[in-house]
Image (cartoon, rainbow, N blue to C red):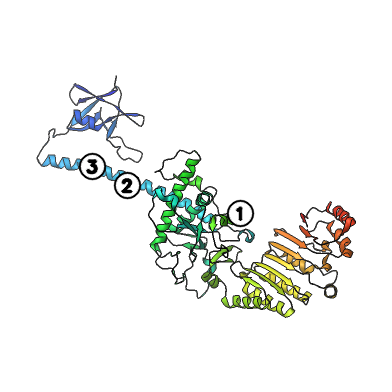
Amino acid sequence: MEDTQSFCLVGTSVIEKIALHNMNGQNVVCWEDILQVFPAVKHIKNGELVVSMMRDSNRIRIQPHCIKHCPNVVLEVVLSPISTPNPGFEGTVLHKLDGIHDQVDTTQRIAQEVWELAKKMNDRLILIQSKTEAILTQNYELLEYTIPRLFIVLPEKSTSWDPKTMLRTKFRLHFICECGEHTKASGSNIPHHLHLANHEGYVVNKPTEFFKKYGPFLTLMLEMIKVGTSIAGHVVPALASLKVVDILDSAQSTVDSVTSKVIEGVDYSLEYLEASRALIQKSDGVDIDDNARMSQQDLATYFAGVEGLEGVDLRQLGSYLSANSSDNLLGNLYRMTTKDGRVKWVCRHHYRAAYQEAHTQKLRDVVKLAGGVFDEQLGSIKVTLRSSIAATEFYEAIRKAKAGVYDLDITFGRDCSRTDLEAFEKALKMSSVSILRLDLHMFQASVASKLLSTSTRYEILVRIIEHTNMKMIHIVLSNDFVKLSSLQPKRSSHLHKLSIEMTPRASDFRVLVKSLKTNNPLTTLDLTSNSIGKEGALSLSEALKTNTTLTTLN
């Protein structure tokens, strides 16, 4: 038998029974059904208590209107004083009031839905902001940071989103200039907010694998560019608010953040990433709704492992891109370090703003005059100093240029002396160099014996090794530096790698073997082209039995 609720008109004993409905596991009586039996009903009473319409957790009337089931009770129906349709003034007023009452309920319901949507959007923005902050504040080692780390993708052609054609869409990767407080200089009138590099971008030639690997990171970067943020000295204006970008060259470029094409491209890329994620999940056997957006929990899971790209991820980036053989995958950006040692990639305008152009130009001239090579984008120099005069000019230039050089490959010529080496150590301490290849193989025995006593011969090298800003050092020694046991720095934990290369004379091999019996900072030893013979090989093997620091022997 169908469950019912009993009703009667107040003051009468005639009972009417109305069928119940189940709503979220609870029996209710729909107000519409009550109106069918009692058209003029005003309200319902349970004894002296007026029965209220049911409401949700936000105190808004549930739609459709209903009252709670009261088992084993006969509810009394109170009729309105106007029990029949009244064409007069009173009936019109009551009808209008009922309409207003329903409109208030509808307005409250809409307001609740808007509030819930705003909360979801705010939670999403908070999650994206926290993940973006983790990326922008991450401190990368120079050795792992050989190409720019911030980038987005945009479609090659501006088009409206259509999931049917998504697999035919071609994308280009665009790097982002990491300017900010660290590039501001007095007198600079250019904006210092993150922006797309002035470069045509790199074609993504393996989109399926690319988006599977870098999808979460790209979503964060695109959201950051779209909504804007201000984190850790970086400012990213909301994309829609950008009207001019003074730092771009006047030449037309596909990277033009002042046009609506970029805004449309960002939206398209976000839609593509969402659809791509769904396709990947389906291929993994996950049942998802094609029209459903990611929930907050799904989004948190999607971003769980995103805190910036590791060195290996950056190094693999090039394998997914099409670039010219002459292109070094830098996107017209230059590497620089901030005062606190963080590595940033910035455009030429901000690079010049951060460093005094006059000092950089002087360094260019000195390196060129010495026949060396200065790669400003990578901040690397390779040079041979053939005289004390050339050495003095180079030290002065690199000291004043300061943060513009990180990777230095330097060879000392035959005419360089201990004084030049000491001056180099002092200049190195004031520079930003952290990767050093020091070639001393041309130091002559006669010069070394006169200028470097046995007790002080290694002091300068030890001081260089102990510089805390150094991360990787490779030293090529002359025959006069075979006593490796003298290379005992007090601290070397800051080094990722210390390697020494040399070609000892046969007469010095016994001294070298003796040095290897002690644990010194040496990790790599190159004995290429050495005729040490059988006895020498046996002596070397015995020495290495007690040495635990040497890991590579050539």
Residue at mark 3: 101
Which quarter of the rendered picture does the C terminus lie within? Answer: bottom right
Amino acid tagged 3: His
Q: Position of residue 502 (x, y in %)?
A: 80, 64
Find numbered disc 1 in the image and state the secondary structure of the residue it sits on. helix
Q: Which mark is residue 312?
A: 1
Amino acid tagged 2: Ala
Write down the quadrant of residue 489 in the picture: bottom right
Q: Is residue 221 left or right of residue 400?
A: left
Find numbered disc 2 in the image and state the secondary structure of the residue it sits on. helix
Write down the quadrant of residue 315 in the picture: bottom right
Label 2, label 3: how many angstroms apart (C-alpha)? Answer: 15 Å
- In the image, residue 341 sits, relative to residue 43, either above or below, namely below
Mark toward the start of the polypeptide (2 vs 3):
3
Amino acid tagged 1: Val
Q: Residues within 10 Å of mark 1 (few under 14, many from 20)?
A: few
Label 1, label 3: how many angstroms apart (C-alpha)? Answer: 64 Å
Q: Position of residue 492 (x, y in %)?
A: 73, 60
Residue 522 in sight in this render: no
